[in-house]
């Protein structure tokens, strides 16, 4: 650079290049400025992250027992948890002590009377396992009225300091509708599944997958998960292999209407129990496509049941529905025909399989049920759609339903239709209102409620499964045996074969007419098939 400037100065009388010192000055200045701007940016993000980590939500813990103290200590001692304990709540009118862990103890009466601003809390942590349904409802209602977020306690081990990703979860509607855990005869259930080969059809569905999770805890030799839905089957495969690495699973993509494909599965394994959960369950969809109900719910059940009979599987347990009781829609009627076939097969000459049916109502959070539907509508900002303001349904949790299925399947000798105690009915309007409030919104203010009218085949009230006039008790207080009439195998076999032939031709009206011929109590409601009832009368 120095030589170039000398030559240029001699030839044209001017320097063409900058002085090296000046160039170095500009370069160093640029680097310093760049590093400074980068440092400011990184410092800004660092401050933002520190602020995020230190801004904790203030919570009150319901309870002053040892477990409440353990939860409080777990939260206080874990800096990664984005919550801080500001006090304790108790149902006692006059608690003996004023503070716990240096935080105030607030009585129920004081909590009710104190305005939310004075409580200086953002939410309440509740251990629902220590509360009755009535107590749970009371505390949730008070918290909702005060606009406080309601959180539920996790497992205590999740409060360990190394669990940096830990977070408390909001109370869900399932927590309020669910009932206390039922008591199973675990030894009897374990003996039935221990080191046995088990088949679950519809294994990727909400009921089938939960059955598998519970069966896996009893150390079976093999669980074959059969389903025709490719993506859900893949999803449950990933979950089960991670959750139960020591259990052998086989995942079969197959349709229960394909008898040859099904038989290849039965030939390959000597099953001890078959749980048949595969079915179409969506009432309005099946009302529009009754022939599919025949092909899957009836013929599919026949295929699985007949193979269980042929290969002398000791136990066959079918999952049915309360909609099979005095059905008002095609789906319920098709499940009732499936029940009749399975029950009749029990009495077939030479049968060595115990054919058992379990019947229950709506399960919380199952695919296609009202709760996930409402949840999606709330997430989108509404409106929440309800078919009728007076519509009522019975609910139980998926785990509870599956526990009862396992227990009933173990109790059954063959030919029984077991029905479950579904508890108290729930008004769907109240359910929707409670879900909106739990999400932090006000019904008909933030999120609208809209009535759409009853759908085809839908009824306002469902049958009470545990009606003592229609059932017989068992040794388990939540399980009864239905007194439903049965049919001979020859009769039901002939009628279902005829129905299958009609269904393959796609004649909807004739399919429904034959359903009504088999299920005399099937009376269509709010449906195009009501005219068939008038002809029969």
Image: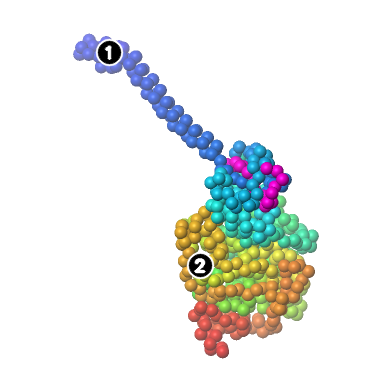
Q: Is residue 446 left or right of residue 241?
A: left
Secondary structure at badge 1 equals helix
Which residue is identified by label 2?
Answer: 386
Q: Is residue 338 above or below residue 97?
A: below
Which residue is depicted at the point 45% across and 28% down?
39
For the record, the magenta segment spans: 82-98
366 above or below 246?
A: below
Percent of width and height locating residue 517: 60, 85
The reply to whether residue 48 is visible in this rendering is: yes
Q: Residue at x 73, y 72 (%)?
A: 480
Residue 280 in view of the camera: no
Q: Viewer-proximal residue, 332 or 372?
A: 372
Identify the residue at horizontal 47%, vertical 61% (top origin): 444
> Mark 2, mark 1: which one is toward the viewer?
2
Residue 26 location, x and y as percent?
34, 20
Residue on which the image places disc 1 = 5
Above or below 535: residue 299: above
The colour scheme of the drawn protein is rainbow
Q: Position of residue 85 (x, y in %)?
A: 62, 42
Q: Nearer the viewer, residue 2 or 448?
A: 448
Asked where in the image residue 28 lies, by quadrant, the reply is top left
Q: Quadrant of residue 162?
A: top right
Of the residues under marks 2 and 1, which one precedes in the sequence? 1
Is 33 left or right of 429, judged from the image as shown? Answer: left
Closest to the observer, 360 or 168: 168
Question: Which disc number belongs to residue 454?
Answer: none
Q: Describe the element under mark 2 as helix, strand or loop.
A: strand
Gap in angstroms between the C-alphas marked 2 and 1: 87 Å
């Amino acid at each position: 650079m120095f030589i170039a400037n000398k030559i240029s100065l001699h030839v044209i009388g001017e320097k063409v290049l900058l002085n090296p010192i000046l160039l170095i000055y500009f370069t160093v200045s640029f680097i310093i400025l760049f590093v400074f701007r980068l440092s400011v940016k990184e410092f800004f993000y660092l401050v933002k992250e520190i602020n995020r980590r230190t801004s904790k939500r203030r919570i009150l813990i319901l309870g002053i027992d040892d477990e409440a103290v353990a939860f409080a200590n777990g939260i206080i001692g874990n800096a990664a948890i984005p919550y801080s304990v500001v006090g304790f709540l108790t149902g006692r009118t006059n608690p003996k002590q004023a503070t716990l862990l240096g935080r105030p103890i607030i009585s129920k009466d004081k909590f009710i009377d104190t305005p939310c601003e004075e409580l200086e809390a953002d939410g309440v942590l509740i251990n629902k396992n220590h509360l009755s349904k009535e107590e749970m409802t009371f505390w949730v209602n008070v918290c909702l009225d005060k606009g406080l977020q309601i959180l539920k306690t996790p497992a205590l081990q999740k409060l360990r300091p190394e669990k940096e990703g830990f977070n408390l979860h909001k109370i869900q509607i399932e927590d309020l509708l669910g009932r206390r855990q039922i008591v199973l005869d675990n030894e009897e259930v374990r003996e039935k599944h221990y080191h046995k080969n088990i088949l679950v059809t519809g294994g990727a569905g909400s009921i089938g997958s939960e059955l598998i999770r519970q069966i896996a805890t009893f150390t079976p030799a093999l669980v074959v998960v059969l389903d025709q839905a490719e993506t859900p089957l893949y999803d449950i495969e990933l979950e089960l292999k991670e959750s139960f690495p020591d259990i052998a699973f086989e995942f079969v993509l197959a349709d229960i209407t394909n008898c040859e494909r099904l038989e290849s599965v039965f030939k390959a394994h000597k099953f001890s129990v078959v749980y048949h959960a595969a079915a179409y369950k969506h009432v309005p969809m099946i009302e529009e496509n009754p022939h599919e109900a025949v092909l899957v719910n009836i013929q599919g059940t026949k295929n699985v049941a007949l193979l269980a009979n042929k290969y002398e599987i000791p136990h066959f347990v079918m999952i049915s529905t309360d909609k099979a009781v005095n059905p008002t829609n095609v789906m319920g009627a098709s499940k009732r025909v499936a029940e009749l076939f399975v029950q009749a097969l029990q009495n077939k000459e030479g049968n060595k399989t115990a054919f058992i049916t379990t019947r229950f109502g709506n399960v919380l959070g199952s695919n296609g049920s009202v709760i996930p539907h409402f949840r999606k509508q709330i997430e989108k900002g509404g409106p929440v759609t309800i078919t009728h303001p007076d519509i009522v349904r019975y609910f139980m949790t998926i785990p509870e339903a599956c526990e009862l299925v396992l227990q009933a399947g173990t109790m059954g000798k063959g030919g029984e239709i077991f029905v479950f105690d579904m508890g108290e009915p729930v008004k769907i309007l109240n359910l929707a209102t409670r879900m909106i409030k739990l999400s932090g919104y006000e019904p008909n203010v933030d999120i609208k409620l809209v009535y759409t009218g009853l759908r085809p085949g839908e009824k306002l009230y469902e049958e009470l499964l545990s009606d003592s006039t229609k059932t017989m008790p068992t040794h388990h207080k939540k399980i009864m045996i239905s007194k439903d009439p049965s049919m001979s195998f020859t009769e039901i076999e002939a009628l279902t074969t005829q129905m299958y032939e009609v269904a393959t031709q796609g004649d909807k009206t004739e399919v429904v007419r034959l359903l009504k011929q088999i299920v005399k109590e099937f009376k269509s409601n709010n449906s195009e098939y009501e005219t068939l009832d008038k002809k029969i009368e």
